Image: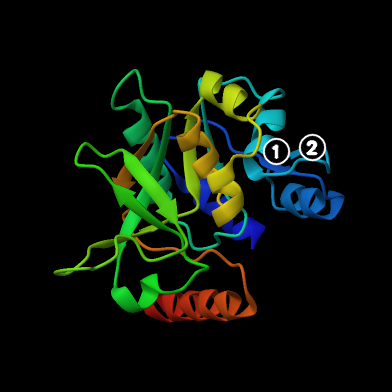
């Protein structure tokens, strides 16, 4: 799964360097065997952002992108769109991507939803369907597991303590919103599947099979 993510990141046109941050030597060996770069980090990292912030100490850059290792279907174009959204204005601190979602899919608590302001800033992330369709039809946006950060912002948010909303929803990005940071959202080029359950894995494998058959 990690190698699929590595391949997508290598294909992104907006990235100058790609590395896999891990605390597991088995993952590092698999990455290196595939010709990739692995950076060993502490097993005490409590989140992907913490792990990225530690790895950033060995890789100087102005912008860092966290492509989560459980997103084997993440398209390179989605990575590029997150970077483009971040760099669209000097004051932007964090960026990510979303894709439209139907009401049935939005009921899945394993799929994170995001409400977005008219200017593109994220208003809130939730495992619940948001907005609630009290009257009329709701527009649902699925959040994909991908973030781009300014270097200074990454260092700051990695030092933030867990927040009440983060604990309630088990969503790290709510910590940043509660601390006053803005997350700028761009529409993704295509969907992805975060593999959190055995059912997710089965769906991801089916997507890959269909993609291979379509190319054949």
Disc 1 to disc 2, how far (Cα)? 6 Å
| Secondary element at image label 2 | loop
CB of mark 1 within 8 Å of CB of mark 2?
A: yes
Residue annotated with mark 1: 51
Q: Which mark is residue 12?
A: none
Q: Is residue 202 left or right of residue 28?
A: left
Residue drawn 51% across the image and 79% down it: 203
Residue annotated with mark 2: 41
Q: Position of residue 177 (x, y in %)?
A: 45, 36
Q: Position of residue 43 (x, y in %)?
A: 83, 43
Residue drawn 77% across the image and 55% down it: 30
**Between 109 and 1, the one nearer to me in the picture:** 109
Q: Residues within 10 Å of mark 2 (few under 14, many from 20)?
A: some
Please identify the quarter of the rendering in which residue 80 is found: top left
**Between 182 and 151, the one nearer to me in the picture:** 182
150, above or below 99, in the image: above
Please identify the quarter of the rendering in which residue 140 is found: bottom left
């Amino acid at each position: 799964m990690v190698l699929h993510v590595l391949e997508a990141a290598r294909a992104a046109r907006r990235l100058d360097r790609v590395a896999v941050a891990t605390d597991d030597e088995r993952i590092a060996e698999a990455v290196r065997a595939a010709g990739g770069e692995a950076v060993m980090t502490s097993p005490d990292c409590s989140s992907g952002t913490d792990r990225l912030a530690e790895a950033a100490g060995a890789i100087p850059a102005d912008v860092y992108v966290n492509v989560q290792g459980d997103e084997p279907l993440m398209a390179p174009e989605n990575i590029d769109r997150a970077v483009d959204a971040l760099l669209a204005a000097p004051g932007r601190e964090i960026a990510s991507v979303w894709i439209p979602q139907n009401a049935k899919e939005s009921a899945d608590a394993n799929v994170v939803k995001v409400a977005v302001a008219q200017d593109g800033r994220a208003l809130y992330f939730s495992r619940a369907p948001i907005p609630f369709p009290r009257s009329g039809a709701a527009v649902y946006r699925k959040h994909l597991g991908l973030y781009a950060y300014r270097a200074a912002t990454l260092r700051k948010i990695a030092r933030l303590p867990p927040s009440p909303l983060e604990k309630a929803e088990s969503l790290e990005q709510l910590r940043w919103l509660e601390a006053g940071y803005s997350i700028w959202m761009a529409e993704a080029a295509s969907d992805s599947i975060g593999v959190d359950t055995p059912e997710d894995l089965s769906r991801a494998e089916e997507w890959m099979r269909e993609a291979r058959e379509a190319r054949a």
